[in-house]
Image (cartoon, rainbow, N blue to C red):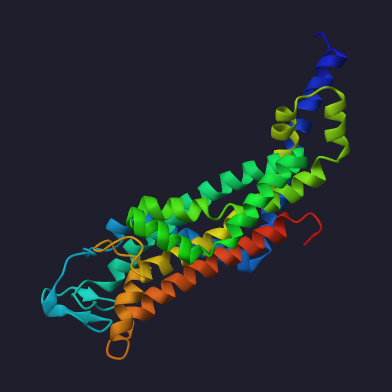
Amino acid sequence: MTPPTPSATARALDLPARVSPTRREWVAFLRRLARRRTALFGLCVVVAVLVLALGAPWVTTWDPVEQDIGNRLQAPGSVDGSGGVHLLGTDQLGRDLLARIIFGARPALLVGFAAVAISGLLGLVVGLVSGYFGGWVDDVFMRLADIQLAFPFILLAIAVIGVLGPSLPVIIVVIGVSSWVVYARVVRSEALSIREREFVQAARALGVRDGRILLRHVLPNALTPWLVVATLDMARVIVIESALSFLGLGVQPPTPTWGGMLADGRVYISTAWWLATFPGLAILVTVLGINLFGDGLRDTLDPRLKV
């Protein structure tokens, strides 16, 4: 039998070496994340809310928009005439509150994911271009960011929604377009630092185009802080969506929203406390879970921390 050539042996030894470092990095990342119990708790909360929202028709048998005036304002745990149990009670129109809370997670998460995607991608592009090229390009984008920050968001949202009308696409676009500044500033600061590194200078010396340097070298190194900001910003977007719905500028009835349920429940706060309490707790738990997971993700991805 002919022994393997040295080149074949080297290739055979190099193959696992190329794959194993990436696997080791993922394993190390998961181990560091697993040590942070608050982050795991936040991740479990986020996953649970997402599963409930996606499987809402199978989780509850109640119709969230079906009215039953005869069973209005029933306390939590009450039983109606058909033998059905309302675990969290009913609202002023006899609708099951638990079903409305579960279905209300859908617009909150949809606005959160879509608005963060719009603002995150916009801020990522602006931050990369502004930080890498600098000069007048940086000045123009940063002055636009200053102008954006000068406008109060609520007043801007009220003006735009008042003209275009309250709807889910309008809310997503308004929140997404007005929230790109934080992403742009974070990515810009990373790009300013990365463009001065030795590997970027070497790529320039070899004649590599700026677009390829941005995609192959700057973007992967700036993606980690961007991901952390996107995770934490999603909690803020959910609160904003709830606030707009509370003011009547969000998704319109009969679609259930957490903010809309809070607005309806404030009228009955002294006689039917559950109408405002449980939707408020849903917002609190969801936002808390996202923030805890975002904080844990930030600490885990921080290279200065070896915990």
Question: Measuring 51% from the left and 47% from the top, which residue is drawn there?
Answer: 118
In the image, residue 21 sits, relative to residue 230, either above or below, namely above
In the image, residue 110 sits, relative to residue 209, either above or below, namely below
Q: Quadrant of residue 61?
A: bottom left
Q: Position of residue 150 (x, y in %)?
A: 59, 62
Whether residue 118 is visible to the viewer of this picture, yes or no, is yes
Q: Position of residue 103 (x, y in %)?
A: 32, 61
In the image, residue 261 sits, relative to residue 131, either above or below, namely below
In the image, residue 217 sits, relative to residue 147, either above or below, namely above
Q: Position of residue 276 (x, y in %)?
A: 35, 79
Question: Measuring 17% from the left and 65% from the top, which residue is drawn there?
Answer: 66
Whether residue 229 is visible to the viewer of this picture, yes or no, is no
Quarter of the image where the N terminus is located:
top right
Question: Measuring 51% from the left and 51% from the top, which residue is drawn there?
Answer: 177
Q: Using the image as rendered, state which of residue 218 and residue 192 is in the foreground.
A: 192
Q: Position of residue 85 (x, y in %)?
A: 22, 75
Question: Measuring 79% from the left and 54% from the top, which residue is drawn there?
Answer: 303
Q: Quadrant of residue 2?
A: top right
Q: Using the image as rendered, state which of residue 306 and residue 211 is in the foreground.
A: 211
Q: Using the image as rendered, state which of residue 293 and residue 82 is in the foreground.
A: 293
- The furthest residue to the bottom: 270
- The furthest residue to the top: 2
Total labels: the figure holds 0
Q: Is residue 152 left or right of residue 146?
A: left
Q: Is residue 110 left or right of residue 56?
A: right
Q: Quadrant of residue 84?
A: bottom left
Quarter of the image where the C terminus is located:
bottom right
